[in-house]
Amino acid sequence: MMNAVFSELREKALAGECLTRDECYRVLTCPDEDLEVLSGEVYRVRYAYKGNRVSVQILTNAKSGNCGQDCAYCAQSAAAKSGVASYPLAPFETLSRNAEIAREKGAGRHCIGLSGMTFTDAQIEELRGYVEKLKAQADTPICCSIGFLTIEQARRLKEAGVDRINHNLNTSRGFYKNICGTHTFERRVENIRMLKSLGFEICCGGIVGMGEGDEDVVDMLLEIRGLEPQAVPINFLTPVKGTPLENADTSKLTPEYCVKVLSLVRLLIPRADIRCAAGREKYIHHRQRFMFNAANSIFAAGYLTTGGQSIDEAIRLILDEGFSYEVE
Ligand code: SF4
């Protein structure tokens, strides 16, 4: 029975059709014993657009902590008592070193994370200078994870060579008030639309496991689909001590549930780079193969404020699961 349902969903995805809400729920709530069938169908969609390759991304936290926003999951919020390092723009040498590692290892992209929601023109100029030098050093694509830019600031970064910008929706429109009181969901959507209008590639994803329901996961993914991002990072909440979500109940994040979420992302946004981001090492466990059947991208060498698998370990994992790793 489920075989027929999942093969129908695969056909819809390959035809570029959007799944109905009901179909989305069926994916998220299917019995674990049906996961193998689901994942096999999802792999066919993944294979059609991304082949058998997994892209490894390296993340540099270029500006950390002391953010005036109050995102409940975030160790970098000034409201959090996480003890996370707080520094303004890191020295160029830090980014340059990571760019070199990215180039040597053949990483698909160098992602640069910057805490904070707004930036002064002087800060953007400094970043722009860094990006120009990094681009001269290696042609690894650069993605900046950055808050709300003015259109002029965004233009300056585009001219410097930033290829892609990460700006996540994080959760559903309806659930957003539960995780942030200092800016709105709509402001994030508007920012992404502005960036798209300037020709940036968009990386837009979210976090699962913050107390939202399946309907919120579906709503978030449908919103993200509507923004037509090139990449969709999915994080599974890793509660950080000192944040409002430090004691969040993450029991829902079984390996099987995480794989169902990633599978749904692939079916809804089939052409995108789907990245299993934070929480991968914590939650996926023995379901790595199913994860790669949906996701074609992972981070290595840690996340913004939490450690992670080394690049060599990530590459070994990819090869062990029968995939190849990618030089974009
Ligand atoms: S997620 Fe971004 S905006 Fe929110 S507190 Fe963290 S750094 Fe600030």
Image (tube, rainbow, N blue to C red):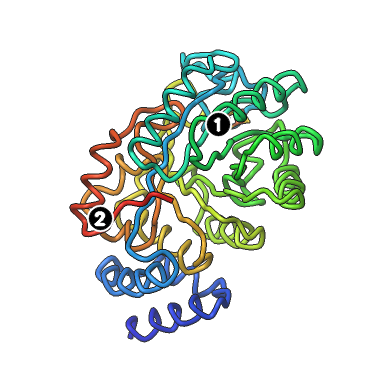
**Helix, strand or loop status at disc 2:** helix
Q: Which mark is residue 136?
A: 1
Q: Is residue 84 above or below residue 104?
A: above
Name the mark nearer the viewer: 2 or 1: 1
Q: Name the quarter where the N terminus is drawn.
A: bottom left
Q: Is residue 321 above or below residue 27?
A: above
Q: Nearer the viewer, residue 167 or 296?
A: 296
Front residue of 289 and 110: 110
Q: Which mark is residue 287?
A: 2
Q: Amino acid at mark 2?
A: Arg
Q: Is residue 206 left or right of residue 309?
A: right
The front one of 187 and 63 is 63
Horizontal side of residue 106 vs 86, given as left or right: left
Q: Which mark is residue 65?
A: none
> Residue 320 at what x, y percent from top left?
18, 52
Q: Secondary structure at mark 1?
A: helix
Sequence-wise, the earlier of marks 2 and 1 is: 1
Position of residue 250 measured from the top left corner of the image (x, y, whole percent):
38, 42
Could you tell whether 151 is left or right of 181 in the image? right
- The image quadrant where one finds ligand 1 is top right
- Check disc 1 and give the amino acid type: Ala
Question: Residue 199 at what x, y percent from top left?
Answer: 71, 51
User: How far is mark 2 from mark 1, CA to CA?
Assistant: 40 Å
Q: Is residue 41 above or below residue 158?
A: below
Say which residue appears at 64% left-offset and 58% top-offset.
Answer: 223
Q: How many marks?
A: 2
